[in-house]
């Protein structure tokens, strides 16, 4: 039995036909059809609203485009083996000036920080006591010399009488022994006099080497002794640069011919490495605590430019030139223990490239492995780069060393990305 459906009608006074089949009723009078129609209208309205929002977003510019980055080509050059180190400067000669005899300081003969010559007078100690000692030992020497002269005369006369048997052989031997004793006493007096004269000379404290003085630690009137340091003196003609070389670097340097090894140095306030020198000392063993060996290079310092204790950058280079690839050092990123660069090809897609960096040369880093000459490397804007993402590269001009040349402030760039040009045209 088919259930009857009460149709909806605007004519409330007309009763429905109870015997009429539901499928024969008009569409407008079916309640389920009316509900479906209402739902369809609501969905279409929602889609129309979403479409309008999407069109509004696209009208406002759409998703962001490829980020602009600066790129520069990797270069290829012939270079020699090169290693960079840091160290400290030390004077080849450094002297603590001390008094060799005690006494009060009579006078200081230099200004603090003065440059002096070897043998120049620095301090004077009161010499009166030591002059008196010299006079006393001079008198003792004169007495010993007189005794020796008498003993020699007695021995000579006795030897002359021995032939005529006027004296015995025993007496001659006793006189000979007395003469030798007098001679020994004379030598002792002479040695004492020499010591007294040395002490008198030590009251004048002179510079043992040429160099630059520190300040006077002891001033006039103070009593000094051999245990006190009066000042310090360092040489200036040459300077040593001491630095530690790792085991790996040491093994690499051993393969370089010593005749071709060159050392260059730069101070903290200098660009590059303007000073040339030579390696003159390598320690006889590696320090097991640090795994490094101490090396020394010597540099000329006749102009007094270098002072002991200064920080120095040292570079050792040598061996036969070899062909290497270089890229700006700032283009290299760090990913935990790995080093990498971003390479941009013709498709303008960022390529993550792991590399093995080598020595640093005037802002350019040697790439031992992972990069080919001519490849475009991102040198600026690395924080905006994602591997596999599109980029808008702007190639920078490079100087003779391969370093990118940045545009001067306010100057127009040599080329502009396409997105920038289109934005300007809009």
Image (cartoon, rainbow, N blue to C red):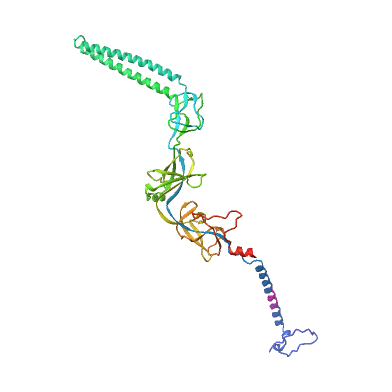
Q: Quadrant of residue 140?
A: top left
| Above or below 240: residue 130 | above
Quarter containing the N terminus: bottom right
Q: Is residue 303 or residue 19 the one in the foreground?
A: 303
Visible in this render: residue 339? yes
Q: Quadrant of residue 64?
A: bottom right
Count of numbered badges drawn on the protein: 0
**Residue placed at 39% from the left, 48% from the top?**
260
Visible in this render: residue 290? no
Q: Does the stretch in magenta take in 154?
A: no
**Residue placed at 26% from the left, 16% from the top?**
177
Magenta stretch: dominant SS? Answer: helix
Quarter containing the C terminus: bottom right
Question: Horizontally, is 62 left or right of 325 in the view?
Answer: right
| Above or below 297: residue 55 | below
The percent coordinates of residue 65 (x first, y second) are 60, 65
- The single residue placed furthest to the right in the displayed view is 13
- The single residue placed furthest to the bottom in the displayed view is 19
Q: Does the stretch in magenta take in 44?
A: yes
Q: Which residues are magenta?
A: 40-45
The percent coordinates of residue 204 (x first, y second) are 45, 25
The percent coordinates of residue 6 (x first, y second) are 74, 85
| Above or below 43: residue 106 | above
């Amino acid at each position: 039995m088919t259930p009857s459906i009460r149709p909806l009608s605007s004519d409330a006074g007309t009763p429905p036909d109870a015997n009429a089949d539901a499928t024969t009723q008009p569409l407008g009078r079916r309640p389920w059809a009316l509900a479906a129609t209402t739902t369809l209208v609501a969905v279409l309205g929602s889609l129309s609203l979403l479409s309008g929002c999407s069109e509004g977003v696209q009208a406002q510019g759409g998703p962001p485009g490829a980020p602009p980055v600066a790129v520069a080509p990797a270069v290829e050059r012939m270079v020699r083996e090169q290693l960079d180190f840091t160290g400290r400067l030390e004077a080849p000669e450094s002297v603590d000036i001390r008094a060799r005899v005690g006494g009060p300081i009579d006078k200081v003969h230099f200004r603090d920080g003065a440059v002096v010559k070897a043998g120049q007078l620095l301090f004077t100690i009161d010499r009166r006591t030591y002059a008196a000692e010299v006079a006393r030992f001079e008198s003792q020497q004169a007495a010993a010399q007189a005794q020796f002269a008498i003993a020699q005369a007695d021995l000579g006369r006795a030897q002359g009488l021995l032939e005529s048997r006027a004296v015995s052989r025993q007496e001659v031997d006793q006189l000979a022994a007395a003469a030798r004793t007098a001679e020994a006493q004379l030598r002792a007096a002479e040695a004492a006099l020499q010591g007294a004269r040395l002490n008198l000379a030590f009251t004048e404290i002179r510079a043992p080497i040429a160099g630059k003085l520190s300040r006077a630690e002891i001033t006039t009137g103070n009593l000094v002794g051999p245990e006190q340091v009066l000042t310090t003196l360092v040489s200036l003609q040459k300077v040593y640069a001491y630095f530690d070389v790792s085991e790996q670097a040491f093994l690499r340097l051993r393969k370089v011919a010593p005749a071709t090894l060159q050392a260059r140095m730069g101070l903290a306030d200098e660009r590059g490495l303007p000073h040339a020198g030579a390696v003159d000392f390598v320690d006889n063993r590696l320090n097991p605590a640090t795994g490094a060996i101490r090396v020394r290079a010597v540099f000329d310092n006749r102009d007094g430019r270098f002072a002991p204790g200064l920080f120095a950058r040292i570079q050792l280079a040598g061996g036969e030139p070899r062909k290497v690839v270089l890229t700006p050092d700032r283009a290299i990123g760090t990913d935990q223990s790995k080093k990498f660069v971003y390479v941009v090809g013709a498709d303008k897609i960022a390529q993550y490239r792991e590399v093995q960096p080598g020595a640093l040369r005037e802002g350019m880093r040697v790439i031992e492995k992972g990069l080919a000459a001519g490849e475009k490397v991102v040198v600026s804007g690395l924080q905006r780069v994602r591997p596999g993402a599109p980029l808008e590269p702007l190639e920078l001009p490079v100087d003779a060393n391969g370093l990118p040349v940045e545009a001067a402030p306010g100057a127009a760039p040599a080329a502009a990305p396409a997105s920038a040009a289109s934005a300007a045209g809009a």
